[in-house]
Each structure stands twice: as structure tokens, then as C-alpha cells.
Image: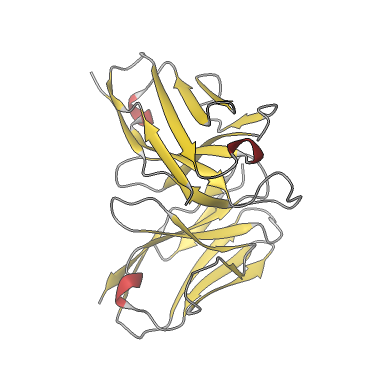
Amino acid sequence: QVQLVESGGGVVQPGRSLRLSCAASAFTFSSYDMHWVRQAPGKGLEWVAVIWYDGNNKYYADSVEGRFTISRDNSKNTLDLQMNSLRADDTAVYYCARELTGFWDSSKRPLGYWGQGTLVTVSS
Amino acid sequence: DIQMTQSPSTLSASVGDRVTITCRASQSISNWLAWYQQKPGKAPKLLIYKASTLEIGVPSRFSGSGSGTEFTLTISSLQPDDFATYSCQQYNSYSWTFGQGTKVEIK
């Protein structure tokens, strides 16, 4: 079955950087757009970024634009999130998520599969 | 950005109750709306997409309706496994946005 496993979370000081990774398995990774979604403690879900199946398009939430970079390696079935200039309000569980269907589906697609999440705590 | 507003924020109900959660978009999103269920410490789970399409494996007591800016999630007969937080999400345009969530509690 589809598996998404995030890693790289931890405690980091404000202003520093952290890189999250998501290892995908049991599906053709290169056929799906991939997303990062986060959830601050006790708060709702917040969409962070998307990268298209071929890596040619990326979009970001205004709250992370210019600080975070999403990338993927289709040869290694991995999705990354490089987070720079971290702030206290970036503290959250970060989820990697896959769209329900792949690029061949011309309609808009929700998030069908999620990882278990990795916690990022930004604190001095 | 499109704002998604859910109501109520918290809902107290009993097993067997019919439950309705509302989600309103700040502008039309056609029917590009999904509903997710989340339990404490767990990842969200897709329940409904395209406003009313039930994801495979989701019990038929869940249903969704609406289009444009007004949407509802209905649980026809609440079961013990349904006590959780429910969130709507628009995927009409980037950046995607979620509602703030509705916690369904045991009455």
C-alpha cells in the first residue's frame, strides 16, 4: 500500500534552517503531484507547498514564500522541504501528502494519502 | 487567498445522532471541495472529494453536498468511531486552504 514516511524534524533555533524529507513507496512517485501540509499544535491544517509530478512547477503559501523550497528526486522517490529563516510560528507537525490521482487525471485532485508527520519546533 | 469558514467549531452529539457541518468559501470554488477526518495524533484521512464523492472505503453514513460557496458534511447516524475533527479544504486554486476544523465530541 502507499507509504509516505517523513523525517528530519527536530528542535531548531529561530533564524536557522532545517530540511525535511519524505520517502515514498508502493506507487509510481513520478506520476503524482506532491504537497507539504503543516499543523501547528492545537490548530488547524495549513497547506504549505506543492510540486508537480515532473518538478516543473512549484507553488507556496504566502506564509512560507521566499523562505521554504520544495523539491523532489523522482529517481529516489523522495520529496524534500528546505526551510530557511525559521520562525516560532513555523512550529508544527509537517505532513507529506500525495494527490489522490496522478497527472493523467485532468481534473483537480484532493490529497488522498498522507504520511504520519514530523514535528518541527522552532525555539531558542 | 480563498478563506474557508467552518461552523460550528465544536459539536457535541450522541451515538445515533444526525450531524451536519457547514463550510463556506469566501469566493466560488465550484465543487472543488474535500472533507477530511482527523483523530488525535494521526494524519488526516480523505472522506469526500469533489464536494459529494465518497472516497473508497468510507462508510455510506457520510455524505457531502454543495457547490459554489456553501458546502455541508452530514453524518447520518453518528458512530463511536466518528468522534474526531473534520476539516474542509478547497483545491480550486493555489494556495489551497483549509477550514479551521470542527471537533465532534461525545455528548
Q: Residue at x 37, y 84 (%)?
A: B17
Q: Is residue B1 left or right of residue A103?
A: left
Between A29 and A98, the one lying in front of the other is A29
Between A3 and A82, the one lying in front of the other is A3
Q: Is residue A63 visible?
A: no
Quarter of the image that includes the C terminus of chain A = top left
Determine whether B36 is above or below B98 in the image. Answer: below
Identify the image's colour scheme: rainbow, by chain, secondary structure or one colour.
secondary structure
Residue extending farthest to the top is: A16
Determine whether B60 is above or below A35 in the image. Answer: below
Q: Residue at x 49, y 40 (%)?
A: A25
Q: Position of residue A28 (x, y in %)?
A: 60, 41
Dividing the picture into quarters, in which one does residue A72 lie? top right
Q: Residue at x 36, y 44 (%)?
A: A116
Dividing the picture into quarters, in which one does residue A18 lie? top left
Determine whether A44 is above or below A81 in the image. Answer: below
Q: Residue at x 64, y 70 (%)?
A: B66
Between A89 and B43, the one lying in front of the other is B43
Determine whether B35 is above or below A88 in the image. Answer: below
Q: Is residue A78 left or right of residue A19?
A: right
Q: Position of residue B16 (x, y in %)?
A: 35, 86
Between A64 and B16, the one lying in front of the other is B16
Q: Position of residue B5 (x, y in %)?
A: 51, 56
Residue extending farthest to the right is: A106
Q: Position of residue A70 (x, y in %)?
A: 54, 26
Q: How many marks?
A: 0
Q: Is residue A4 visible?
A: yes
